[in-house]
Amino acid sequence: MPANSAAARRPPLLDPGAYRTLGLFIFLVVCLTAVSVSNPHFLDINNLKTMSSDAAILMLAAAGQLLVMLAGNIDISTSSIIAVSGFSSALLMRDHPETPLACVALLVIAIGLVLGLVNGVVIAYFDVPAIIVTLGTLSIYRGLNFLISKGGWVVSRDLPPKYTEMANGEWFGHPALTNMLAVALATALLTHLFLARTRHGRRLYAIGSDKANARLIGINVPGYVFFTYAVCGMLNGLAGGMWCSRYNFAQSSTGLGYEMTIIASCVIGGASVTGGRGSTVGMILGAIMLSVIIHAMNILQVSPFWKMFIQGAIILAAVILDSCMARKNRA
């Protein structure tokens, strides 16, 4: 056999997804190095705590979004679920400050679950396009939050000191190792194990790759789609509780526009907008990278208008890259 023929048939060292994850990690290191050089205080402990907190909340929400996207769908209502659950937790602690934090956590998860189930039922069992359903519930849930909040705020002086401990409680006495970061990492680990080690995770990839074939081989496609929205709702509910606990206040506009940041962290991490491709590791790197970039722009005093432009450009570049990789794989 000719040498060039053998070389042509030699399998690549890494699959395309692994190359993308490695490239994302290298780009993240370059970003951290460049910003640290321009501003030596960028990696101070307070900044590290801010970035880790931002990344933790984003990872919680993005883990649920990843499951939804792997099955070939999308959830645009996430920011409104975060708002409803977060404000509800603040109201509970304001009116009943003796409530155990474990009960607060269960409340926000339950609220997120109910709202996620509404999405799941309509999308999975009434076969309505996910983008239409969640675009509608984005407004419905946001309106629900305005009804609950009456357009007002719950400020820190009305909340018991222990409320902030739900998110900001420290591990090992290190300010950057918070409860919310521990919960986010545990959630990411469970998501990874579910996708990589169980047949249910593999079935999600199969559904996102080809729903028609998934049905032919006996996979309960509506049931799995319903499941992804239920989990997405629960994780967004928890993210909402952590959000308001972190800042120790709640407002009616909490999380406004955050749904695009959640989707961006998945897409940047390699999740396909058409389903069937993505990983937890990529999602984590995408969430960290977005948190670093956003915080770096704050440190460098970049205009809010440029922040929107840069974030949109990053999302567009990631989608274009995903499309190019999909065409190359088909070829």
Image: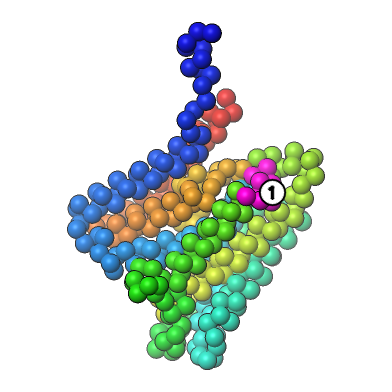
Relative to 80, say whether 90 is above or below: below
- Secondary element under disc 1, as helix, strand or loop, is helix
Q: Considering depth in this image, is 266 or 309 the residue closer to the camera?
A: 266
Question: Dot 1 corresponds to which residue?
Answer: 199
Residue found at x 61% / y 65%: 233
Place of residue 223 in the rendered image (x, y in percent of width and height, measured from the top left): 75, 55
Place of residue 309 in the rendered image (x, y in percent of width and height, measured from the top left): 37, 50
- Magenta segment, principal secondary structure? helix
Q: Tell me: 110 left or right of 49.
A: right
Can the viewer see residue 207 in this picture? yes
Q: How many marks?
A: 1
Place of residue 220 in the rendered image (x, y in percent of width and height, measured from the top left): 77, 50
Relative to 21, say whether 251 is above or below: below
- The range drawn in magenta is 197-206
In the orientation shown, which residue stands out farthest toward the top?
2
Residue found at x 56% / y 30%: 329
Coloring applied to the structure: rainbow
Residue found at x 56% / y 76%: 105
Residue found at x 62% / y 54%: 194
Q: Amino acid at mark 1?
A: Arg
Quadrant where the image shows the N terminus: top right
Whether residue 198 is in magenta: the answer is yes
Structural crowding at the residue carrying mark 1, measured as other residues with C-alpha within 10 Å and reported as few (<14), some (14–19) or many (≥20): few
Q: Considering depth in this image, is 255 or 34 the residue closer to the camera?
A: 34
